[in-house]
Amino acid sequence: MNTENLTQSGKDQLSKLQAIVQQSIAEEKLVVDNLLNEPKEILTRGQSISDKVARFGGSWSFIISFSALLFAWILFNIYAAESRKFDPFPFILMNLVLSTIAALQAPVIMMSQNRKEEKDRKRNENDYMVNLKAELQVRSLHQKIDLMQKEQMKVLYETQAKQIELLERIEGELRRSKP
């Protein structure tokens, strides 16, 4: 085997590696496209409202403003003239309003949380696909490295055989040329 054959063998090895890389890219393109092109979430009017209610109902501005409203309600109904009091102590109307708000706010918040839970589930599936893609890439890299090692070992053995053949030929010529 001469140097031209060794060079050709190296070129063949590179061609095989390029083919594997191109095949890997083509196979993984579908997975990448599915991951990057996550569809935009389309919210109904009710879902949008439930998100806004949940966002506001769980904020400090809601807690502070609602506490101020209740405090004002209590102060007004304690210190106002008897004819102007609309909910005297023990504040039965205030308790009814608070119960109604809690009864309406709880299911609205649950709707928002359920929708977000579904969104998280889809995100977890997406993460699984990313991990699966990474595993496929690692496997592909292992295949490429194995192929490179096999090809390099083959080339090394062929080169070594050629070198041994050349050394034997040189050794034979040296023996012949010695008087």
Image (cartoon, rainbow, N blue to C red):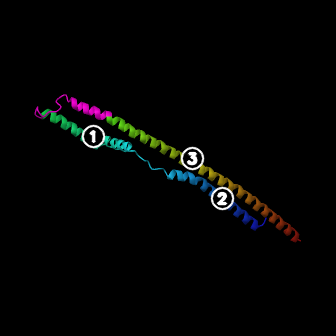
Label 1: element kind? helix
Q: Residue at x 29, y 33 (%)?
A: 100
- Amino acid on which disc 3 is placed: Leu
Q: Residue at x 19, y 36 (%)?
A: 73
- Is residue 14 rendered to the left or right of residue 178? left
Point out which mark residue 132 bears.
Answer: 3
Label 2: element kind? helix
Image: magenta residue range: 80-103
Q: Residue at x 71, y 62 (%)?
A: 12
Please say if 94 is above or below 34: above
Question: Which quadrant of the rendered structure holds the N terminus?
Answer: bottom right
Closer to the chain start, of discs 2 and 3, is 2
Q: Is residue 52 magenta?
A: no
Calculate the distance from the C-alpha at mark 1 to the C-alpha at mark 2.
63 Å
- Is residue 69 rendered to the left or right of residue 18? left
Residue 75 image offset from top left, x and y in percent: 16, 35
- Is residue 85 rendered to the left or right of residue 120? left
Please tell me in which quadrant of the rendered image residue 7 appears. bottom right
Residue 124 image offset from top left, x and y in percent: 49, 43
- Amino acid on which disc 2 is placed: Ala
- Amino acid on which disc 1 is placed: Ile
Given contact means CB atoms under 8 Å apart, are the residues at marks 2 and 3 in contact?
A: no
Q: Is residue 94 magenta?
A: yes
Point out which mark residue 19 bears.
Answer: 2
Would you call the spot at circle 1 few (<14 residues within 10 Å), some (14-19), or many (20 or more)? few
Residue 150 image offset from top left, x and y in percent: 71, 55
Would you call the spot at circle 3 few (<14 residues within 10 Å), some (14-19), or many (20 or more)? few
Question: Mark 1 highlights which residue?
Answer: 63
